[in-house]
């Protein structure tokens, strides 16, 4: 009988950075392994704590990507290029499907009625099998994404229901309107403007270097890198602590396009409200504007206290939620 050994998950690496932040963060890292980076910003001053990593370590930021897609949409509306009520079918070939009638604003705010992921049996089976094998489940190209959208059934349209499928369609619709690809649109309209030179959107594994960072599942299994192809607008960005600190500071300084995306407009349940992708909740005495991210082997959180000019970014290459850590650091410092 052949015995296959499982890779031993590393422990969190040595700490570098600001001693005070290291002391606050270190006791909170239970379940995280290998690499973790934390950036705390207040009054335009930032401090960092890195565990087994550095300021230029690359992480999958997962669904924080949706906030970037939302900024692009909000700016297109502000520029008069699109209206919030524009129908998805006016930008993408969805025939007479139910998805064609969904508005871009409904997609941006998770109120489209679309399922979280494609719900055709073949898609659910393929996705579930990929996850069980610790492989990337998001391999659909644009043609496949559109086929999935045409087949999707809408449920409770107008009510909040988180949808990766909807976010992907929003980003691909914006790219189609701009006559380019989603990665090119994001690079031109946001990343270049903010100087985020180490942030990129690999749509396939072929675009990753052979030594591209990968991560770990919550139970210590090595995970394949996730490159999201046509689902990239929903979670395909890779970035670094330095670049994400630039992003957070630009949001606090109101220097990003599409800032209206952050304004809470609709109920999202559990005490949260949602704007265009961005969530807002009350924690202590702070209105926290936030979004998290999670892929097979990475977790992330970006939390803003816009009133007091503060932010926390946490990036980790373990699929263990870091939301509570970020909010605790943000609120306790107020």
Image (spheres, rainbow, N blue to C red):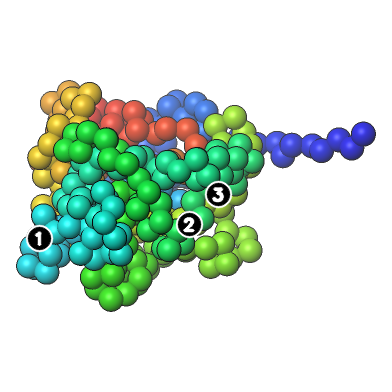
Q: Position of residue 304 (x, y in %)?
A: 21, 42
Disc 3 packing (10 Å; few <14; some 14–19; many ≥20): some
Q: Residue at x 18, y 47 (%)?
A: 106
Callout in the foreground (3, 1): 1
Q: Quadrant of residue 6?
A: top right
Q: The C terminus is located in which quarter?
A: top left
Residue 66 appears in the rendering = no
Q: Residue at x 37, y 67 (%)?
A: 183
**On screen, 237 above or below 281?**
below
**On screen, 146 above or below 319?**
below
Cα gap from disc 1 to disc 2, whole angstroms: 28 Å
Which residue is the site of mark 2?
140
Q: Position of residue 123 (x, y in %)?
A: 50, 45
In the image as oriented, which residue stretches furthest toward the bottom?
A: 179
Q: The N terminus is located in which quarter?
A: top right
Q: Callout 3: helix, strand or loop?
A: loop
Residue 185 appears in the rendering = yes
- Disc ID at residue 136: 3
Q: Quick check: marks 3 and 2 in contact, CB under 8 Å? A: no
Question: In this image, 236 relative to 88: left or right?
Answer: right
Cα gap from disc 3 to disc 1, whole angstroms: 34 Å
Question: Which tag, 3 or 1, sits closer to the chain's start?
Answer: 1
Q: Callout 2: helix, strand or loop?
A: loop
Q: Residue at x 35, y 52 (%)?
A: 149
């Amino acid at each position: 009988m052949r015995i296959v050994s499982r890779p031993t998950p590393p422990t969190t690496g040595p700490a570098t950075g600001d001693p005070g932040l290291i002391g606050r963060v270190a006791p909170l890292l239970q379940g995280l392994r290998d690499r973790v980076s934390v950036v705390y910003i207040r009054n335009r001053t930032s401090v960092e704590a890195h565990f087994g990593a550095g300021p230029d370590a690359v992480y999958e930021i997962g669904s924080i990507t949706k906030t970037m897609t939302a900024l692009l949409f909000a700016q297109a509306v502000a520029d008069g290029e699109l209206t919030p009520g524009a129908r998805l079918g006016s930008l993408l070939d969805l025939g007479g499907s139910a998805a064609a009638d969904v508005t871009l604003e409904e997609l941006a705010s998770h109120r489209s009625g679309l399922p979280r992921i494609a719900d055709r049996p073949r898609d659910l089976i393929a996705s579930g099998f990929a996850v069980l094998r610790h492989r990337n489940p998001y391999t659909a190209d644009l043609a496949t994404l559109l086929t999935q959208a045409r087949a999707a059934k809408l449920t409770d349209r107008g009510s909040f229901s988180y949808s990766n499928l909807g976010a992907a369609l929003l980003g691909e619709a914006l790219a189609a309107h701009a006559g380019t690809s989603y990665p090119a649109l994001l690079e031109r309209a946001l990343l270049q403007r903010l100087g985020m030179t180490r942030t990129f959107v690999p749509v396939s594994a072929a675009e990753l270097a052979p030594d591209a960072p990968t991560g770990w599942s919550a139970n210590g299994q090595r995970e394949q890198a996730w490159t999201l192809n046509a689902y990239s607008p929903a979670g395909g960005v890779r970035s670094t602590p330095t670049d994400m600190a630039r992003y957070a500071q630009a949001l606090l300084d109101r220097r990003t396009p599409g800032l209206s995306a952050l304004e809470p407009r609709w109920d999202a349940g559990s005490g949260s409200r949602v704007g265009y992708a961005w969530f807002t909740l009350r924690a202590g005495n702070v209105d926290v504007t936030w979004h998290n991210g999670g892929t097979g082997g990475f977790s992330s959180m970006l939390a803003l206290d816009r009133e007091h000019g503060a932010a926390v970014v946490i990036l980790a290459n373990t699929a263990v939620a870091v939301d509570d850590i970020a909010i605790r650091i943000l609120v306790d410092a107020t």
